[in-house]
Image (cartoon, helix red, strand yellow):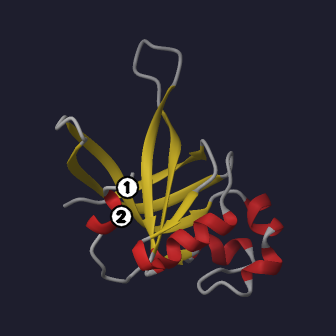
Amino acid sequence: MNNVSLVGRLTRDVELRYTTKKVKAVGSFVLAVDRDARKGVSEKSTDFIPIVVWGKTAEFAGKYFAKGHRIALQGNIHTRMWEDEQKNKHYVTEVIADKVFFADAKYREADADDCQETPGCEEDDAANEENEVAEDTSEQSEQEVLTEF
């Protein structure tokens, strides 16, 4: 089973692109996720996890998420390999998120006016905690864009 749930802060704004012929949106960002301190170690550590979102989820993230926002997401881990021009192999591990949520009330309230236009977005805090803000259910090959990252 390959399921991931994370809560963290964006280290930069979402980079939003489109596949060739602007068929599908794809967004990428890095999520800083705190890890509990180990026994005997007083300081917490932070993992910086690359995240990719597709379709309406990407468009939503590109419009509403910004550096420093605290978000939650659900998805799964993907690994891939690509070769550069010098034939060097590069391996990438990233989370493909299919559901993203606001995790801080202040950001949900700031975008409440635009929220009405976004399917799946709820204005009140209770609804946001129970329902996903955006979910991508479309099925299209990811290979077209993954080589661009």
The Cα atoms of the two marked residues, 1 and 2, are separated by 5 Å
139 or 46: nearer the viewer:
139
**In the image, is residue 116 above or below residue 69?**
below
- Rendered residue at 60%/47% (across/down): 10
Asked if the residue under mark 2 is in contact with the one under mark 1, i.e. CB atoms within 8 Å, the reply is yes
Residue on which disc 2 sits: 145
Residue that mark 1 sits on: 148
Q: Amino acid at mark 1?
A: Glu
- Give the x, y percent position of residue 120: 59, 84
Which sits in the foreground, 84 or 26?
84
**Quadrant, the N terminus:** bottom left
Q: Amino acid at mark 2?
A: Val
The answer to whether 54 appears left or right of 128 in the picture is left
Describe the element under mark 2 as helix, strand or loop: helix
Q: Pointer 2: residues within 10 angstroms few (<14), some, or many (20+)?
A: some
Q: Residues within 10 Å of mark 1 (few under 14, many from 20)?
A: few
- The picture places residue 23, in percent across and down from the top left corner, at 43, 81
Is 112 situated above or below 61? below
**Secondary structure found at label 1:** loop
Give the x, y percent position of residue 85: 24, 41
Give the vertical position of 139 relative to 83 (above or below).
below
In the image, residue 9 lies at what x, y percent?
60, 45
- The structure residue drawn at horizontal position 73% and vertical position 80%, both measured from the top left corner, is 115
Taking depth in this image into account, of 18 and 56 the one nearest to the observer is: 18
- Residue at x 57%, y 73% (from the top left corner): 59
Instruction: Name the mark on residue 111.
Output: none
